[in-house]
Image (tube, rainbow, N blue to C red):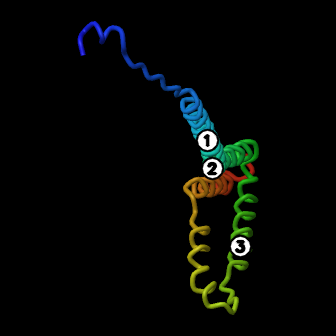
Amino acid sequence: MASDDYSKFHFVFYFDLRPYVRKEALFNLIKTAFVCVVLCMASLRFSSDADALVLRPVEQMITKVEKIRDNPLIAMKMADDEFRHEEITKSKTGKHHTGNWWIDAYGSCYKREQAELMETVILEKTIVKLGSLLALGFGEAGA
């Protein structure tokens, strides 16, 4: 084929990729929406866990410190109430046999995880004990 013929005749192929590109764009939008929903749900879950595990116990400690600051003698009542509450929970969580060996054997593992104390609870109890010791040491004159 001569160069003259080449300039006269040539093949041109057109591919219409618009439907495929539109489908790909739609799939990418769906993927982006799914990732956004998953991230929103994860952030809400994290926020609720942080609120339950950190903020609420710290707020409880602050309210107890404020109550003890206002009236140091109330710390003795708080200590008595906590002791009574612990004794009631100990009596309720005693060893109960359900008759099902599976639950008796493996149910105790779940209960042990719930019974572990968090540091915030230990700090809260320490604050109440210190307040009751101050109330004992200073008595009515210190209040």
Mark 1 lies on residue: 34
- Give the residue displayed 58% in from the left and 31% down from the top: 19
Would you identify the image quadrant in which residue 40 lies?
top right
Give the residue type that dot 1 points to: Phe
For this view, does 8 lie left or right of residue 92?
Answer: left
Give the percent coordinates (x, y) of residue 64: 70, 48
- Give the residue displayed 24% in from the left and 16% down from the top: 1
In the rendered structure, find residue 49 and report the number of the disc placed on it.
2
Q: CA distance from mark 2 to mark 3?
A: 24 Å
Query: Of the residues tagged 2 and 3, which is closer to the observer?
Result: 2
For this view, does 11 lie left or right of residue 37?
Answer: left
Give the percent coordinates (x, y) of residue 88: 74, 74
Give the residue type that dot 3 points to: Thr
Query: Of the residues tagged 1 and 2, which is closer to the observer?
Result: 1
In the rendered structure, find residue 89 and report the number of the disc placed on it.
3
Circle 2: is it few (<14), some (14-19), or many (20+) Cα within 10 Å? few
Visible residue check, residue 142: no
